Image: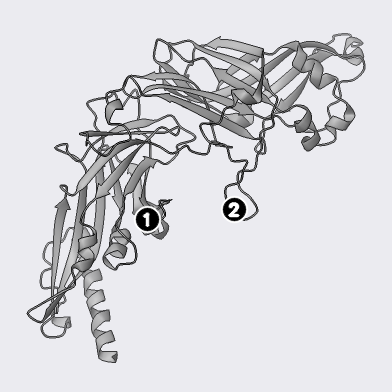
Amino acid sequence: MKNNKYIKQHKLLIVIILTVFTFSGCNKFNDLGVGLLPPGDLLDVRNTILKEDISAYTFLEDSVITSNAPKSLLGSFNDPIFGNTTINFATQFRIQSFPQYGTNPTIDSTFLYLYYKTVYGDTTTTQKIRVYELEDPIHYDITDSTGKTSEYAYYGDVDLKKMASPQIIGQLDFIPKISLDSASSNVLVQMLKIPVDVSIAEKLVSADPSNLKNNDTFLNYFRGVFIETEKLNSGTGAIVGIETENTALVVYYNNDESRADTLPDTLNMAYRVTEFSARVNNFFHDYSSTLFYDNLNSDANEDSLIFIQAMGGLESKIKIDNLSSWKDSVVVTNGDTIEYLINKAELVFNVDTTITDIKKFPPPEQLLFTYIDTTGKQFLPKDYSFNVDYYGGTLTKDYKYRFNITQHLQQIINGEIENRDFYLTTANSNGEANRVVLKGSTSKKGIQLIVTYTKIFQ
């Protein structure tokens, strides 16, 4: 038993050495370490590219959680390839301290301030947004005490308008814009200033002290606002990324104290969106006019292109056949045993740079490649937990997405997991508007699985 363990450890050492030489560009490794192996043992390192066993299809992504994303999205966008996407937004406001308006306050005006830096789409089409007061509460917590998704997690298909009053309290027409700092070339923050009906200010100014004891009582009194985007019938439009923690509802007013000043100045009281404010998006996608609509949500017909879109939009279902056959690769022929060890397994997706303007509509910076377990749930492969950079998925300069699934394939070979379907999605589906067209498995430069493996002959 000790001798067998010794031999196995030396085989593993040789495989590691061969792996290092394989990926360091050295080609003279065929005899490296052979003298260290017991008589009759040989190593053979090979490389193969699998294409024919791969198939890919475009599916609607299961609705994503939109609660409390780093950025809240807003706008309507007629994508030339992906159809129309229209996004609405709801948020709470919190008090920083007990609001004190002084003696005999009179309201001057009220404005809702939204700030954004990112624009996905064009900067020529007018957007129309309307503001309503929320009648139903929205909740901040999206996980329960055990870390599981709670009943207060909101998904992209939540009906926010149903939770709001039908009375419009503010509206604005605007054209999104992007400006750069002339000194640093950094993108400047842009502001949307939406006039809000005086009724909201009156409600806030006249609030009973019992409703202002803390944020819980305040949020039960004033539950926030719902901001609706009007769907565009023409023009390209855009999706803007709202910097939610800079969002504020500001009441401008005067009181006896300010009026007594020699040079009276209008006072203001701000109700802010903070990191603890609930923020929710809902997404509406219309793919009826797209080229891929007839094949959507079906694996009956394989398209030469696959379509990935954030905002709970589109994902790709990937099938890689015959991976399970590798686990049968330990065979006995004429008394000899052949064992396969995976040095590296890299899955490569190529961006189609001809069908779309990738400068105008940049692809996502990162995609996620997940596998399906026996219960139908999605999980990241073992390679992700091993090292995020090792796992990959980021967009390269040559417009490829590369995933290292070495550990995952080895698990299949070892019989630890089954070879089931995979999904390819955006990594930031609830906080960006990016999308990408990839070459499918039937394209000339389509999906490739590049496997470098070692055969051990005993």
Q: Quadrant of residue 116?
A: top right
Checking the image for residue 301, the label placed there is none
Q: Secondary structure at mark 2?
A: loop
Relative horizontal placement of residue 400, taking residue 220 as reference (left or right): left
Query: In front: 411, or 348?
Result: 411
- Up-down relation of residue 453 to residue 89 (above or below): below
Q: Which residue is mark 2?
A: 147
Residue at the (25%, 90%) spot, across then down: 3
Residue 162: name its quadrant.
top right
Q: Residue furthest front?
A: 300
Name the residue tied to disc 1: 381
Crowding around mark 2 (Cα neighbors within 10 Å: few <14, some 14 to 19, many 20+) is few
Can residue 267 be seen here? The reply is no
Which residue is found at the position 66% from the left and 33% from the top? 138
Q: Tell me if residue 223 can be seen.
A: yes
Q: Secondary structure at mark 1?
A: loop
Residue 399: give x, y in percent of width and height.
Answer: 27, 37
Residue 275 image position (x, y, % from top left): 65, 38
Q: How is the image coloured?
A: one colour
Q: Amino acid at mark 2?
A: Gly
* x then y, percent, for residue 271: 73, 26
Above or below, comparing residue 342 to residue 380 in the picture: below
Numbered-mark total: 2
- In depth, the one of 317 and 363 nearer the eye is 317
Which residue appears at 63% of the width and 17% of the height? Answer: 131
- The percent position of residue 416, horizontal first and vertical second, equals 34, 66
**Amino acid under disc 1:** Pro
Residue under the point 78% across and 28% down: 221
Chain-order first, disc 1 or disc 2: 2
Looking at the figure, which quarter contains the C terminus? Answer: bottom left
Gap in Å between the C-alphas at discs 1 and 2? 21 Å
